[in-house]
Image: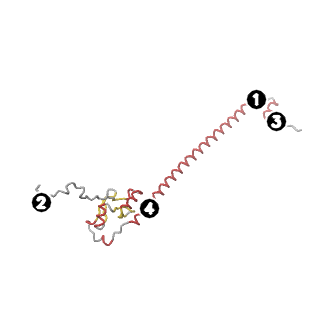
């Protein structure tokens, strides 16, 4: 009794419950359904793959942006450290004990963010700041006096850190005065 097992369709045909035409049409329908399922799975897989690729591209873009922001912050920190180092190494000493004796006539007034600030300096230093040989820079919350060359280096790194940098005064020479050779009479009345 070695009979081969028959499929349900073949058993129904042998029993006479289904005609051969109906069996063929059922078989072709099943084949079509299988193909449609395969095609829809491929589309579903393609859509999922596209979404995954899109998400990965967005993540890469976000990572690049975050790296750029971190790099900018690191550069700002380095510039701030360079400015701080320049100021600490090259600041002009102001005797803190002398400042107590100064009155407002010894203060050099300047603006910082539309606020008038004052820095007490000796008269010689105030004249040099006004004459353009010294400059005032902001280091953290303090104001320091440095040479013009150092102020230029600081300005290259951060223009906002330089508070006062006057142009050097050009002293009028007698060779530029066209009337220097003429004497003014003592009895001249205006």
Number of other residues with Cα within 10 Å of mark 2, as a class: few under 14, some 14 to 19, many 20 or more: few
**Residue denoted by label 3:** 6
Instruction: Name the residue rendered at 44%, 59% in the picture.
Output: 79
Q: Earlier in the sequence, mark 3 or mark 2?
A: 3
Instruction: Name the residue rendered at 34%, 56% in the picture.
Output: 113
Query: Is 119 or 42 nearer to us in this picture?
Result: 119
In the rendered image, the vertical position of residue 6 relative to residue 59, given as above or below: above
Q: Where does the image place residue 66, in percent across and percent down from the top left?
A: 51, 52
Q: Give the SS element for disc 3.
A: loop
In the rendered image, the vertical position of residue 47 relative to residue 114, given as above or below: above
Instruction: Name the residue rendered at 76%, 27% in the picture.
Output: 21
Query: Is 118 or 62 nearer to us in this picture?
Result: 118
Q: Of tags 1 and 3, which is closer to the observer? A: 1
Q: Of tags 4 and 3, which is closer to the observer? A: 4
Q: Are marks 4 and 3 in contact (CB under 8 Å)?
A: no
Q: Earlier in the sequence, mark 4 or mark 1?
A: 1
Q: Give the SS element for disc 4.
A: helix
Number of other residues with Cα within 10 Å of mark 4, as a class: few under 14, some 14 to 19, many 20 or more: some
Q: Where is residue 186, by image quadrant? A: bottom left
Q: 167 left or right of 65?
A: left
**Residue denoted by label 2:** 186
**Residue denoted by label 4:** 82
Q: Of tags 3 and 2, which is closer to the observer? A: 2
CA gap between label 1 and label 3 equals 16 Å
Q: Earlier in the sequence, mark 1 or mark 3?
A: 3
**Residue denoted by label 1:** 24
């Amino acid at each position: 009794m070695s009979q081969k097992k028959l499929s349900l369709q073949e058993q129904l045909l042998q029993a006479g419950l289904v005609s051969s035409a109906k069996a063929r049409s059922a078989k072709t329908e099943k084949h079509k359904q299988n193909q449609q399922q395969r095609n829809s799975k491929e589309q579903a897989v393609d859509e999922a793959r596209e979404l995954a690729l899109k998400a990965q591209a967005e993540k890469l873009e976000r990572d690049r942006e975050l790296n750029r922001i971190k790099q900018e912050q690191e550069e700002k920190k380095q510039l701030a450290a360079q400015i701080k180092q320049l100021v600490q190494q090259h600041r002009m000493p102001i005797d803190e004990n002398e400042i107590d004796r100064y009155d407002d006539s010894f203060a050099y007034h300047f603006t910082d963010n539309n606020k008038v600030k004052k820095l007490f300096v000796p008269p010689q230093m105030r004249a040099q700041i006004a004459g353009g040989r010294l400059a005032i820079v902001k280091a953290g919350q303090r104001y320091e006096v440095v040479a013009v060359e150092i102020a230029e280096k600081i300005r290259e790194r951060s223009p906002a850190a330089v508070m006062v940098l006057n142009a050097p005064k050009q002293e009028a020479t007698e060779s530029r005065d066209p009337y220097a050779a003429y004497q003014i009479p003592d009895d001249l009345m205006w």
